[in-house]
Amino acid sequence: MGYDRSMKLLLMIVALSIAAAFAGSVADKKVYFMYFMRGEGTRPTDQKLLDAMQKGHIENMVNQANLGKLLAAGPLNDPGQARRGITVLHVDDEKQIPALFENDPYVKHDIMRVKAAKWDVDPKMFKPAVDPSSIVEYRLVLMKRGLGMQPENDDMVREHRKFMDGLKKTHQLAVWGTVTGLDGVREVMIFNGTDTDGIMNKLKEDAYVQKALMSPEILPLWMSKGVVGATK
């Protein structure tokens, strides 16, 4: 499943807004990783109503980007269709996040819900889109808590960080960091490129994965080209 024309328009407009707003980013804010989750509300069948809701959704996303509170956004291909897309937010506190989307028609009508968690990454890892007219495919990796029971130690942490640093050179890892409070997910990563098998096979070499302390899930993600680093 790809993205439709309205989502492409959304990404293009948001990318332009992000580029305009980056200069005003505040370094002491925190970064949050957020899902748009499928809600229980009924999606309208009237195309005019759907178009109006999409317009409002776009306008709100653009507004948050203009305010410097949204660093990146894009739709996901979730096999279960529960996670509709992501945003990366740059705000003072998680409690501020619901208010950012209270005017979003999809959220108002419970067609989508927001679910956010603190993401320990440097906001400078996200860049103004170098080509906001171009949308490219990425890979989102969710490192979930595994069933392994072996205790972690300082050596394992150092080796894991070294392994992740190596992925930047070998598999186009663009950004990664730990998350807190996201349904058992311990780390979130975004890779440039679409090499799902290559990424998965490489992650299996990580000690945390081998000892079943973490288990990777890989999802296709679409965002503006260049928002998290150079793409081939």
Image (spheres, grey):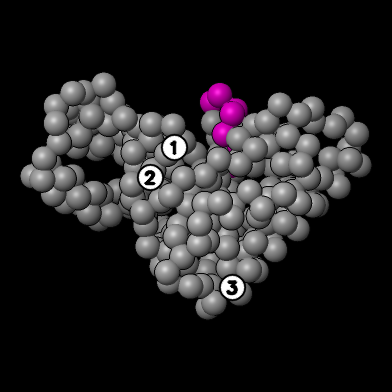
Q: Amino acid at mark 3?
A: Ala
Residue 215 magenta? no
Query: Circle 2 sits on which residue?
Result: 179
Residue 83 magenta? yes
**Left or right: where does residue 76 sit relative to residue 199?**
right
Image point (68%, 37%), residue name: 112
- The circle drawn on residue 21 is 3
Q: Can residue 136 be seen from the camera position used here?
A: no
> Callout 1: helix, strand or loop?
strand
Q: State whether residue 21 is above or below residue 165.
A: below
Q: Can residue 29 be seen from the camera position used here?
A: yes
Query: Circle 1 sits on which residue?
Result: 182
Image point (57%, 34%), residue name: 83
> Callout 2: helix, strand or loop?
strand
x, y percentage for residue 130?
52, 69
Q: Which residues are magenta?
A: 79-85
Q: Could you give the CA–CA distance between mark 3 and mark 1, rounded to whole angstroms?
A: 27 Å
Q: Amino acid at mark 2?
A: Val
